[in-house]
Image (tube, grey):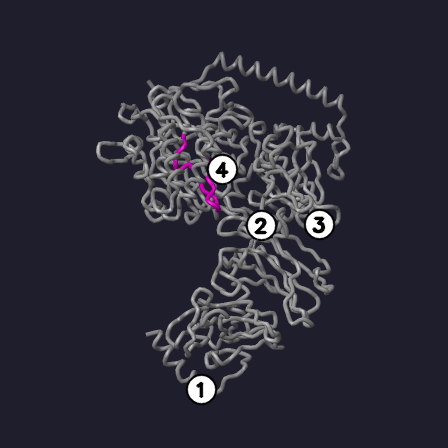
Amino acid sequence: MEVAAIFLLAFPLLFFHKRNAAELVTISASRFLTEQDTLVSETGIFELGFFPEDSSRNIYLGIRYKQITVSTLVWVANRNQPLDSTAGHVLKITDPGALVLLSNISMIIWSSNTTTESMNATAKLSDTGNLVLMDRHAKVIWQSFDYPTEHWLPGMKIGYDYVRGINWQLSSWKTGQRPVVGEFTWGNEIYRYPDDKIKQGSLVVFRGGPWRNERFKGISPMSRNLTFTYTTIVNKSEASYAYSYENSSFLFRITLSSSGKLESWGWMEDGNKWEVGVSFPKDICDAYNICHAYASCSLNMNVQSCDCLDETRFVPRSKKDWEMADWSGGCVRRTPLECRNGSEVFIKYANVKLPDTSNSWYNMSMNMQECEAECLKNCTCTAYAIPDSTLGGRGCLLWFDDLLDIRVYTQGNGGTDIFVRMDSSELVAQSNSSQKQGAKIKIILPVIFAGVLFICFISIWLWYARKKKNHAEPTEEGPILDVSKSREETMELPLFSFSAIANATANFSPDNKLGEGGFGPVYKGVLDGGKLVAVKRLSTKSSQGTEEFMNEVICISKLQHRNLVKLLGCCIQGDEKLLIYEYMPNKSLDLFIFDKTQSMLLDWTMRFKIIKGIARGLVYLHQDSRLRIIHRDLKASNILLDHDMNPKISDFGIARSFGGNESQANTERVVGTYGYMSPEYAVDGIFSVKSDAFSFGVLVLEIVSGKRNRGFTEQEHNNLMGHAWTLYNEGRSMDLIDATIAESCHPQEVLRSVEVGLLCVQQRAEDRPNMSSVIMMLGGEVELLQPKQPAYFMEREFLVSKFSTSTNPGSSTNELTMTEVEAR
């Protein structure tokens, strides 16, 4: 009925326009656009009309420059649904005030999708190239600048409108001649300090760096001396970036090309052509994170090389690989951070392209001193900077991970100062190096030496006293993590006020609730500055208590790895106990692999990437972290996924820490989840790094198959491990793979993964590989051993006294977690 009504209304008006084609100034309900018409801006710079594609008979509704000889479309409405060359296409305004593109008078091809009721609406084209739909009071209800295509015009914003939920980003054409949406996008990441990136699908290929207000002249090699002004807005309502230039008679545009390049173009009147000015990426060193952590790229005779940010304080992670021009390992601090009060300082590095802000936090009201103090509060904070020098020394940007995609410029060629967290010994060893201006620390070696001796004496005394106490008062599990410390001593991360978290979660509104676990409810929150977080609130009825809460705070606050979820802070106020985590927009792995619809979104390449990411996280926990951590509850719902589907191990409430010489321990209080626990742990209470390896093996088989280990039924098998073992022995391991990804998988990677999974779930702990060996096996670097029969411990009897559901932010709640089991 609606289409028929539009047809009846449009037909007589179309007939009238056929005989009166014109250059229109406005479009209204009674005045619309046909193929013969164009909508022209006030001074005739731009025009909107129906334009043919050069290489085909397709027609597009678009905006182009009117006064130049080369047809250049800067915006296209129907990119993925071109019109045919037959007559009868119109653009008109319908009630309640929407722009609609109709094909052959009846079929809706494109619409502005405005829902605001606005009688007597009109549309105009501005001299900036912005198509604007206004109500009768001249209020804008829709504009094309909110929906960019491949061009960034002066006055157009790139970024995000938090109020309206609009993402201002460019998307490339399929080819240079076809406006169909291509594979490249350019924009910024939501809820991070604005940092523009060119992406090919989900893969970052170039990063321009954090935004700032700036003004400069010239766009070489064009023979024009233009003054450009870039304006940045960062507040609760929006994060946006726009530019303008003074010479309004000169035509200038920025385009994301079909090959993934961000190019600036100027119109050369004398040559009747567009001439390119600047193009990014400019060279191989502009490739995203090409030198990896704490390293900068340089070119010599067009040959790329990488150097550590500061060769006196940073060293290659692998010197052998570095010498072979393999920079994938990046650099690390020569002296690791210990995060003791007074043991660390900040060292200034000038003229730096600031690192990737994916794992960052910002507060634009802080000054430099407050920014440094905020970073020192948190052991995971690795650096800070004032991102925009035009704001009078205000604005604080903190990083919470390795510093990635750095580039050091020569003096006067751009860049910003960054202050990197270092051990104080590095400041002493390099007293002549650049230091933070106005630093208050003037260290004298004898004083440090005396201080170190004093600290060592106190540490040894405390260690001896604690050891004596633990021998005198043994606990069930021994003095693995000391939760008896004072709050100030244990909290190596920010303390949030309860009121701040209540405000962030809209007073723990049910609408913000992400899930419910044994720990208590988990809420989504937005902190001041727009940072999204996940808040775990300890329930008074929780099966986990203060010990588990403190265990997680102390444990995870000391850990830093890209495959571990970040604990941003906590809150202890009266009976309230809260943990504040980074928000994982894609929630947990189990919501994907065990759901028929969602599992189709995880192809094999993504699943294999997740498997390897989990393995790297476990290697860090088991051997590379300051503590030696056994997770004890590794499962699909405790693997969270970030915006790029990178896996993050979460939920350290029942984790255990080992000393340097310890390899295993035993307990009478077994905690974990059915289906993931190793037999020696579930039955005898013995746990080690091989217990986590067993859980990892189960997880690998689940990721490959898309089926749960617990509750699996297939012929004679009552768990997934038995089914996988049978298929392996029959040479049919490919039959295990999830049917939704069977066609897209890489058979060798699948077979290798299944075999690694079976090696990890072998009955005897000593037969299972450690996680560093697993990494090499998955990468095909070592030959795999023949796995032995997996454990079928689920058939043995358990005495279970308590159960709880999963407790991590964004997890599902359909797995039973054993929080207390009496081991035999």
Cα–Cα span, label 1 and label 2: 51 Å
Boundaries of the magenta span: 633-649
Binning the other alpha carbons within 10 Å of mark 3 as few (below 14), some (14 to 19) or many (20 upward) gives few
174 versus 322 height, above or below: below
Looking at the image, tell me whether mark 1 or mark 4 is earlier in sequence order. 1
**Three-letter amino acid code at the position of disc 3:** Gly
State the mark number for residue 16.
1
Front residue (pair 555, 150): 150
Q: Disc 4 on helix, strand or loop?
A: loop
Identity of the residue drawn at 34% across and 49% down: 597
State the mark number for residue 405.
none
- Name the residue beneath numbered marker 4: 565
Identity of the residue drawn at 63% across and 77% down: 43
Q: Disc 1 on helix, strand or loop?
A: helix
Instruction: Using residue 715 as the reference point, say whether residue 184 is left or right of it.
Output: right
The x and y percentages for residue 702 are: 35, 37
Cα–Cα span, label 1 and label 4: 64 Å
The x and y percentages for residue 140 are: 54, 69
Frontmost of labels 3 and 2 is 2
Frontmost of labels 1 and 2 is 2
Instruction: Let me know if residue 648 is in the magenta part.
Output: yes
The x and y percentages for residue 472 are: 49, 12
